[in-house]
Amino acid sequence: MPDGSDLREAYGRIIGAVGAGDSVALEKLIAADLIDHMPVPGQPEGRAGFIFWVRSMHAASPDMTGVVSDTVVEGDKIAGRVLWTGTHEGEFLGLPGTGRQIAINAMHLVRFEDGLAAEWWGAADLLGAAMKLNARLEPSP
């Protein structure tokens, strides 16, 4: 079983690769059969789906970066708190690019197997981000 520093390093490398849009690095950090428990709409399964998510985020915010602020390790899992920041240049949450700076707080729980991310849970404050972009919420009919 990896120790806490190994998991922190691997998780930090994943967050760095996401921020850089580095799919080559992600291929080496994420299991091909990754189970993403909270995929975005239209996201394929596995590592390809994770890279799909990264590309969609970079289409919305090409300068997106993530900073890990807290981690907790237990066994083969790491929980992390990340602040994603960038410029809203492309469609995000159905909103066309605004040129505004965005900041999204996110929490992840990642299980590692054989040194690779094997399961991923993620939750982000998308409502807060949408509100900062002046999104209008309309009730469903």
Image (tube, rainbow, N blue to C red):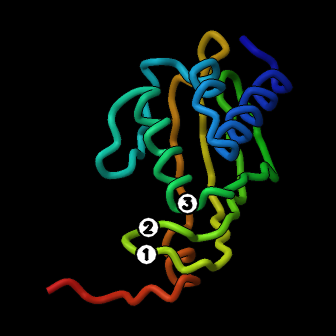
Residue 40 at x, y percent in the picture: 38, 50
Tags 1 and 2 in contact by the CB under 8 Å rule?
Answer: yes
- Residue that numbered label 1 is attached to: 96
Per the model, the C-alpha gap separating discs 3 and 2 is 17 Å
SS assignment at label 3: strand
Look at the image and tell me in which quarter the C terminus lies: bottom left
Please tell me whether residue 71 is drawn above or below residue 48 in the rendered image: below
Q: Which residue is pictured at 79% across the width and 32% down the height?
A: 8
- Residue that numbered label 3 is attached to: 124
Residue 41 at x, y percent in the picture: 31, 52
Q: Amino acid at mark 1?
A: Pro
- Residue that numbered label 2 is attached to: 91
Please tell me whether residue 99 is drawn above or below residue 134 in the rendered image: above
Label 1 vs 3, first from the N-terminus = 1
SS assignment at label 1: loop
Residue 3 at x, y percent in the picture: 81, 19
Left of 5 or right of it: where is 35?
A: left
Q: Which residue is pictured at 65% across the width and 69% down the height?
A: 87
Please tell me whether residue 117 is drawn above or below residue 14 in the rendered image: above
Q: Amino acid at mark 3?
A: Ala
Residue 53 at x, y percent in the picture: 46, 45
Q: Amino acid at mark 2?
A: Glu
Label 1 vs 2, first from the N-terminus = 2
Left of 130 or right of it: where is 44?
A: left
